[in-house]
Image: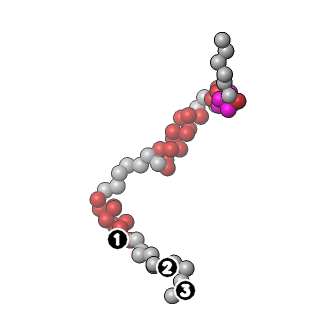
Amino acid sequence: MARYESDFTKFLNEMKTEKPNLEAAQQEGRALLWDQEPQSVEDMRRAKAAKLKQRAYVYSND
């Protein structure tokens, strides 16, 4: 009995066979942008001190 396989699943499987390093490249990109080391307390304190307070109504010309 054949199992159903969607067109998208077929496309992904073909792409993975054509580009075997695709998942490794995706993980490298994720690590570059998202998987970052936690900030130190000093870094968080400096970032908080550098923030500017936003006005209550930002569209005002005041």
Instruction: Tell me the CA gap for discs 1 and 2.
Output: 22 Å
On screen, residue 12 above or below 39: above
Residues in magenta, as a range: 8-12
Q: Position of residue 5 (x, y in %)?
A: 66, 24
Q: Are marks 1 and 2 in contact (CB under 8 Å)?
A: no
Q: Main secondary structure of the magenta part?
A: helix
Residue 27 place in picture, x, y as percent: 51, 39
Image-quadrant location for residue 16: top right
Q: Which amino acid type is marked by label 1?
A: Ala
Mark 2 or 3: in front is: 2
Tag shown at residue 61: 3
Outermost residue toward the bottom in this view: 62
The residue to which callout 2 is attached is: 57
Give, as a three-letter code, the residue at label 2: Tyr
Mark 1 vs 2, N-terminal side: 1
Residue 48 in view here: yes
Cα distance between the residues tagged 2 and 3: 9 Å
From what the image shows, is residue 4 above or below residue 25?
Answer: above
Q: How many marks?
A: 3
Q: Position of residue 25 (x, y in %)?
A: 56, 38
Instruction: Identify the residue position indicated by label 1 in the image.
Output: 49
Other residues around mark 2 within 10 Å, as few (<14) / some (14–19) / many (≥20): few
